[in-house]
Image (cartoon, rainbow, N blue to C red):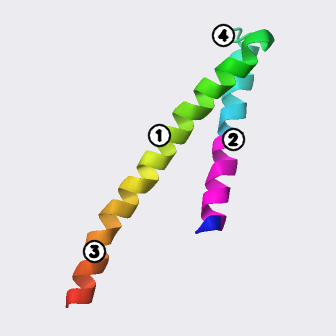
Amino acid sequence: MKKVSTSIDEQILRASKEIIVKFIEVGRVSPTSFGESFKDVYTAIDDTVKAAVNAVKDEAIPEKTAKKNK
């Protein structure tokens, strides 16, 4: 499970970086506000992805329990 979490964290970091680079390219973020903007984007992506992962895990648990009871 640790390896999967690391892979997800790497993907979140990569996506955050790509979004910030695009924002800089189109002028929505300046290089001077990079730090604060990056934190905001990273946190938004991290929260969204981890909530989705937890939702999938929560849905999978009843299925495993039902199979054990058969």
The quadrant the C terminus occupies is bottom left
Query: Residue at label 1?
Result: 48
**Is 38 placed left or right of 59 in the picture?**
right
Q: CA distance from mark 2 to mark 1?
A: 13 Å
The residue at 71%/8% (across/down) is: 27
Q: Nearer the viewer, residue 62 or 27?
A: 62
Q: Amino acid at mark 3?
A: Glu
The relative height of residue 8 versus residue 35 in the rendered view (above or below) is below
Q: CA distance from mark 4 to mark 3?
A: 45 Å
**Is 48 placed left or right of 43 in the picture?**
left
Numbered badge on residue 13: 2
Q: CA distance from mark 4 to mark 2?
A: 19 Å
Say few, some or many: other residues with alpha carbon within 10 Å of mark 1 (under 14 / 14 to 19 / 20 or more).
few
Query: Residue at label 3?
Result: 63
CB-based contact (under 8 Å), mark 4 and mark 1 = no
Asked which secondary structure carries label 1, the reply is: helix
The residue at 61%/59% (across/down) is: 5
* Sequence-first disc among 4 and 2: 2
The residue at 27%/74% (across/down) is: 63
**Is 46 placed left or right of 13 in the picture?**
left
Bounds of the magenta span?
3-13
* Sequence-first disc among 4 and 1: 4
The residue at 61%/53% (across/down) is: 8
The spot of residue 68 in percent (x, y) is: 27, 88
The spot of residue 16 in percent (x, y) is: 66, 34
Q: Amino acid at mark 4?
A: Arg
Q: CA distance from mark 2 to mark 3?
A: 32 Å
The quadrant the N terminus occupies is bottom right
Q: CA distance from mark 3 to mark 1?
A: 24 Å
Say few, some or many: other residues with alpha carbon within 10 Å of mark 3 (under 14 / 14 to 19 / 20 or more).
few
